[in-house]
Image (spheres, coloured by chain):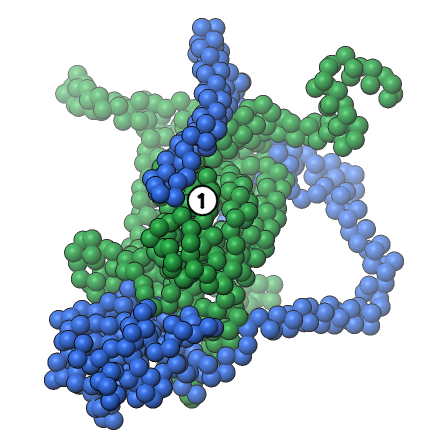
Amino acid sequence: MSSKGKSVAKKKASVEAEHEYEGGLAVIAPDAIKDPGLEPHRVRMTDKSPKHEKAAERQVVFLFLLSILGSAFALYAYFAYPLSETDLGSVRNNTLFLGLGITLGLMGIGIGAVHWAKTLMPDAEVSEARHQTRGSEETRARAIEIIELANQESGFTRRKLIRRTLYGALAFFPLPGIIIFGDLGPNPKNTLKHTMWEKGVRLTRDPYGTPIKASDVTIGSVFHVIPEGLSELEHHKLEEKAKAAVLLVRVDPKELNPSKGRENWAYDGIVAYSKICTHVGCPVALYEQHTHHLLCPCHQSTFDLANECAVVFGPASRPLPQLPITVDAEGYLVAQSDFTEPVGPSFWERSA
Amino acid sequence: MSTATSNAQKKGGFLAGTANYLDERVGVAGILKEFGRKIFPDHWSFMLGEVALYSFLVLLLSGTFLTFWFQPSMVPVIYDGAYGPLKGAEMSIAYSSTLDISFEVRGGLLMRQVHHWSALLFVAAAGLHMLRVFFTGAFRKPREINWVVGFALFVLGMAGGFTGYSLPDDLLSGNGLRIIDGMIKGIPVIGAYTSSLLFGGEFPGESIVGRLYSLHIMLIPALILVFVAIHLFMVVIHKHTHYSGPGKRDDNVVGYPLMPVYVAKAGGFFFIVFGVIMAVAATFTINPVWSYGGYDPSPVSAGTQPDWYIGWLDGALRLAPTHLEFVIGGYTLSMNILLPMVVGIAFLVVVALYPFIEGWVTGDKREHHVLDRPRNAPTRTAIGVAGVVFYAVLWAGASTDLIATHFKMSLNHVLTTMQISLIVLPIVSYIITKRACLSLQRKDREIVLHGRESGRVVRLPHGEYIEVHEPMNEYEIYKLVDFKAYQPTLARPNAKGVITVRARIRARLSRFFFEDRVEPVTQAELEAAHDHKELH
């Protein structure tokens, strides 16, 4: 750019930055009302009256002193309100008094400093020039020059093969860094499709693990059930429980409408359904006796127990899987088999 | 030279000595000369970002304290601590160490509550700060990239919050993770495997707390720190925006010098923010994990709520219509999970890209350092309000059960109302907001041209009653006319004489944005109005 052009650009920038660039669709009225400039500064009481100035100074000092007092109280509270195992109220007192002491220590400084700034430091607004973010033409020219020089010296664009193999190498080098995370978890394979339930496993109370006699289950009652032996597991107890948890309900057998092939999955009106919601897996723990509805408290999916737990409301799409049950020789409730479909939230391969 | 300066410095005592020491080693004088009197504009709404920054500092302080006791292990233990009701219960070490922090460390519960409250405040303040930036148009050139950085910080804030929420391994946070597991499993093809990678096998496994802990105390805070540094560095480069009004131009910055006024105000404000968090933490319980018990996949408590910033995503899950799951060729496609995820991500993408969309529509390539009053950008303000309403409905959607039980309404009706509201309310609020903005602009014009209504009615000698209008001074007038109107563009042919689809879309959008507009009063109009008055 010629020196003349440069000086014009400079002048323009200093006059009004916004005209350097296109305003797009902005309508800039040629006779816009003129900017009268900054409003005249209003003088504060603390600026014109020494009495007020003195008072403000005392207020700031008082706030800082208050802060010291607060911090000191917090130190005192740390020792004066110890925690006691026999009295849980001691936790509350410790939290409250320690916290209030620290609060005072912090607020004294904070409010004091702001009050100081607002009453005693100058409050006249100052205007300072602002420059465009882009570099001056000289700077930009020099930047381009540097890039070109670097390109020339390295031959980055000239030496095509080097450049392209470098791109290739850069594209490949992160791949081991990704694959190395492969052992974060195993391929789930069929684990999601099976639970602890199998033929003859007793239904037991959650969390005690005591077996349930069919005669214990009265009409309308609800049992939270886990398979026998789950409590004694050494490993993967929660993982198994997250799949095997069951809700056991007894209703009048006449109210059930089993579909073909599922007529003998219930025992005398006692039905067992997976407790794990088919939406995103929360426990479906709420049972409404008079409607026979099961409700998931997380997202309100509602299942109709009388209709094989079909979804009647909410974001879930599939019925809760039913656990086929019967009784053993001693009258205890047992499973006939595992669930006949995967329990819990859907996943891509679930029906494959 | 050096002898001369050091001789001069010696007179000044300790402070001058230190200053000299630092200058001769790190060049502190140059830094002070450059930044010491830098001007910062002042407005209450500029404090929102500060609140976010300061609550992040409080998070770092309180979080570091917590790491000294917290143990991120899911190995089961039998609890034998100070909290009586859970004695003898089997729980993870993570949960038991959280109980220990609460009941056996003096100030431990206080710091847990400080940490949780400041996390809630951090995301809230960042969100409000984003709204301030949006509604005042502060994201326009040259700040588009800083908007994206700020957006990343908001998302990182949510991520930090969620990973932290899950650490104590209590019943509530475990159920939160269960929901995440269910959502991940719903992703087509890779869902089940991804869940296995995250949880180290089947849910819940014994890995997730340790993994989230690494993210929560290292990766996420490090990223937040880096992004905060970039965010603030760009503020220094651009200098802060200021509100429109007399004396505020795109080529100046009006405010107070960094030293001493801004240092005192901003520094003091840090202590105020910290103090408020401390006061709330000392007096209000947050996340009383001891009353929930350790995680167990079987029980759940009704009426539970996630932390507020996760609510909108939980609401999105709840509002999905029933029966959206399909089996195609033997594979299960869970649209009931995917739809909410897609809606949530699309919403975030639109938020992140908004500055570029608006910049393209207006074609405005100038730098903007003067903020818009929201009413002076009616379409943007209306879009913003529609977005806020959309978010708010999703958010309220996370409380459908509580709304139903508290107001004794049918849960089904509440949910259906929310589903309809999610579509209808943003549109309605868009229309209302745009009309309200235009009316406010017209009122501004009225005030500029005819003065402010004084409420004083006088009877003229010939019997006419008029209300006296008080004229405005030039500063008040300028405040109301300091904005630019945009006019819609037409789809024009390019150099080859073709009207491209791009040009057509842009013309349509531009009409959508600027068809209705109120232009600022010009000098001529002002004079005409005054002449008119004198004729009376």
In the image, taking residue B448 as reference, residue B62 lies left or right, namely: right
Is B516 or A50 nearer to us in this picture? A50
In the image, taking residue B26 as reference, residue A208 lies left or right, namely: left
Chain A shade in the render: blue
Is A64 or A332 nearer to us in this picture? A332
Amino acid type at circle 1 is Glu
- Give the vertical position of B437 relative to A234 (above or below): above
The quadrant in which the C terminus of chain B is found is: top left
Chain B shade in the render: green
- Give the vertical position of A156 relative to B387 (above or below): below
Is A76 or B167 nearer to us in this picture? A76
- Tell me the SS state at disc 1: helix
How far across and down, in percent of the image, does residue A257 sit?
17, 85
How far across and down, in percent of the image, does residue A294 sit?
23, 71
Counting labels gives 1
Is B180 or B235 nearer to us in this picture? B180
| Residue A180, image quadrant | bottom right
- Give the vertical position of A184 relative to B275 (above or below): below
Q: Which residue is mark 1?
A: B104
List the single residue furthest toward the bottom. Answer: A261
Q: Can residue A224 be seen by looking at this rendering?
A: yes
* Residue at image coords 47%, 73%: A235
How far across and down, in percent of the image, does residue B337 sit?
39, 71
* Residue at image coords 58%, 32%: B252
Say which chain tag 1 marks: B
Q: Can residue A128 be seen by looking at this rendering?
A: no
* Residue at image coords 16%, 56%: B408
